[in-house]
Amino acid sequence: MATTSFVKLSSSSSSWIGQKPASAQLHGSAPCAPRRVSVIRAAGSYADELVKTAKTVASPGRGILAIDESNATCGKRLDSIGLENTETNRQAYRQLLLTTPGLGEYISGSILFEETLYQSTTDGKKFVDCLRDGKIVPGIKVDKGLSPLPGSNNESWCQGLDGLASRSAEYYKQGARFAKWRTVVSIPCGPSALAVKEAAWGLARYAAISQDNGLVPIVEPEILLDGDHPIERTLEVAERVWAEVFYYLAENNVLFEGILLKPSMVTPGAEHKEKASPETIAKYTLTMLKRRVPPAVPGIMFLSGGQSEVEATLNLNAMNQSPNPWHVSFSYARALQNTVLKTWKGQPENVEAAQKALLVRAKANSLAQLGKYAADGESDEAKKGMFVKGYTY
């Protein structure tokens, strides 16, 4: 006997949609009782907490300090100031950052590397407690890095889904409340349809697993700055990537109110002959977001992607000159740390000055989130570009 299929629109909706199949229409047979298909949200019992965490991170005048560099990448940073890449030196640098007095006024969350999540200060205080005492939400990088994608145009895919559920549960117990997964898309490499789909599917699976374990997922398909393409080409690729990402997020029943995004700004390729003004970058970036990102998403936390400290702040400021459906803010690593690192130089006597440098950059980006930043008085160091071709974390 022919049946009528019914699909529930959402777990909280009481509306049902049914359509009589063609066979029943042709033969006039009576339908059976409706078959109910319920949507199971990935967030599960954590839904309210996830929404609260996302809103806390996406709070006015605040953004994210990203210090989730791998040990190898952190080693490159330390090497630039003549320090050996040891756990002691990595701990000292991250202690400098995470114990900066007053940082929580401008920073709402900090993404940590796994080593840092389990570390303490030299006085024995857990880093996660330092953050929480400063009203900063601890986060954790959960991906396992990039690997060559077979069958693609020399592109990559992101590893780390195996064992992610159990790792996420442990990170939650340790105090983390949000997660980060970075994959990349390369415009000079196409990007291929395979690479875009792999990036979107991996992000969606990660997001669902994170929510199921109480962590707000930061969704980050970084569109690399590499290339000499114009800004119009970046917009075209960004729209394609984010369309695919949200399709698969929906397929995996991810709660949009309990996620954060970490997109690249829509800029020309780093090697393009013409630079774009902050106003142009803001126009193209906001166009992409309005076309692709639902207003249910609470926060857009931009990555800096090799821009100078001042460029990243100016561009963010330009995007906040008029109201947006989301909290438009920052999740910067190099664009918050460059001057700090150069000020510190690995010397204990420079810690206080380095912490003041961090507050200067954090406050500048806080003002940019509010649309009130002016670049007057910025140092030459803050204006230096940090793009590295083929950059890896």
Image (tube, rainbow, N blue to C red):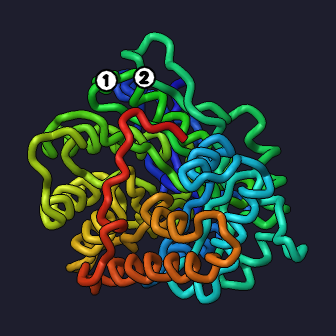
Give the residue drawn at x 41%, y 15%: 152
- Which residue is pictured at 47% across the width and 48% down the height? 220
- The structure residue drawn at horizontal position 50% and vertical position 12%, both measured from the top left corner, is 150
In the image, residue 328 above or below residue 393: below
Nearest the camera: 370 or 217?
370
Residue 6 seen in this snapshot: no
Q: Position of residue 327 (x, y in %)?
A: 39, 73
Q: Is residue 239 left or right of residue 262?
A: left
SS at mark 1 in the image:
loop
Circle 2: element type? loop
At which x and y percent is residue 358? 52, 76
> Quick one: label 1 or label 2, which is nearer the N terminus?
2
| Residue beneath disc 2 | 155
Mark 1 nearby-residue class (10 Å; few <14, some 14–19, many ≥20): some
Q: Nearer the viewer, residue 393 or 181?
A: 393
Q: Which residue is mark 1?
A: 189
Considering every residue shown, the one lying at the far right of the view is: 124
* Amino acid type of the residue tagged 2 in the rendering: Glu
Q: Do the residues under discs 1 and 2 have CB atoms within 8 angstroms?
A: yes
Task: Report the quarter where the C terminus lies.
Answer: top right
Mark 1 to mark 2 CA distance (whole Å): 7 Å
| Residue 388 percent location from the top left of the image | 38, 41
Left/right of residue 151 with respect to residue 161 in the rendered view: left
Residue nearest the viewer, comparing 385 with 272: 385
Q: Using the image as rendered, state which of residue 386 and residue 303 is in the foreground.
A: 386
